Amino acid sequence: MSSLTHFDAQGQAHMVDVAAKPATHRVAVATGRIEMQPATLALIESGTAKKGDVLGIARIAGIQAAKKTSDLIPLCHPLALTRVALAFALAEKGNAPQVVCTATVETVGPTGVEMEALTAVQVALLTIYDMCKAVDRGMRITDVHVLEKHGGKSGSYLATPQG
């Protein structure tokens, strides 16, 4: 395992210098889900939530969040993103009706976009919570993680299936 890169030799936090790294095409895919009551999922699916199109608003929120990641994560580099896409899947998995969010983020640059993909997922799921909390305060955001990343010196990463 390599050492933590956000600390210098004296243990002080610092922003990693990526100036010497080549610009390569980088992609990260992250996912997460929000569990809810069956009636809440039906409300989202029907598009009749009081605040409007829940998934449409969550998609825009996730895109905005990916673009603002470096404003939220102190040592994260600001990046020129070339693509941010969010997809939602509604499912009745066992006793936990849920919305699964998957974010794909791309750039051509010297550092990866995993943080942007994770931030997009989290904010999209938080937006779903915000828009539906009047009818279901017990919703639960869970299983947020990177599914895959490509590009850069470290190459590709694919999460191992859980279960």
Image (cartoon, grey):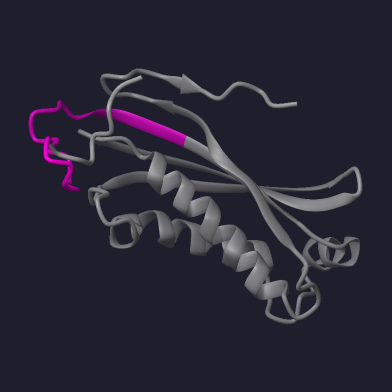
User: Residue 34's quadrant in the figure?
Assistant: bottom right
Give the magenta part as a residue range. Answer: 9-28
- Looking at the rendered structure, the number of numbered marks drawn on it comes to 0
Residue positioned most to the front? 10
User: In this picture, is 83 found above or below 40?
Assistant: above
Q: Position of residue 81 (x, y in %)?
A: 31, 46
Q: Position of residue 124 (x, y in %)?
A: 56, 59
- Is 83 on the left-hand or right-hand side of 74? right
Location of the N terminus (image quadrant): top left
Location of the C terminus (image quadrant): top right
Q: Main secondary structure of the magenta part?
A: loop
User: Residue 19's quadrant in the figure?
Assistant: top left
Q: Position of residue 127 (x, y in %)?
A: 59, 67
In the image, what residue occupies the spot 42% across and 60% down?
65
User: In this picture, is 111 found above or below 77?
Assistant: above
> In this view of the protein, which residue sits in the foreground, 101 or 143?
143
- Magenta includes 26? yes
In the image, what residue occupies the spot 27% across and 27% down?
3
Q: Position of residue 64 (x, y in %)?
A: 42, 62
Q: Is residue 20 visible?
A: yes
- Is 17 on the left-hand or right-hand side of 152? left
- Is 85 on the left-hand or right-hand side of 115? right
- Is 29 on the left-hand or right-hand side of 128? left
- Magenta includes 159? no
Residue positioned most to the left? 20
Q: Is residue 59 visible?
A: no
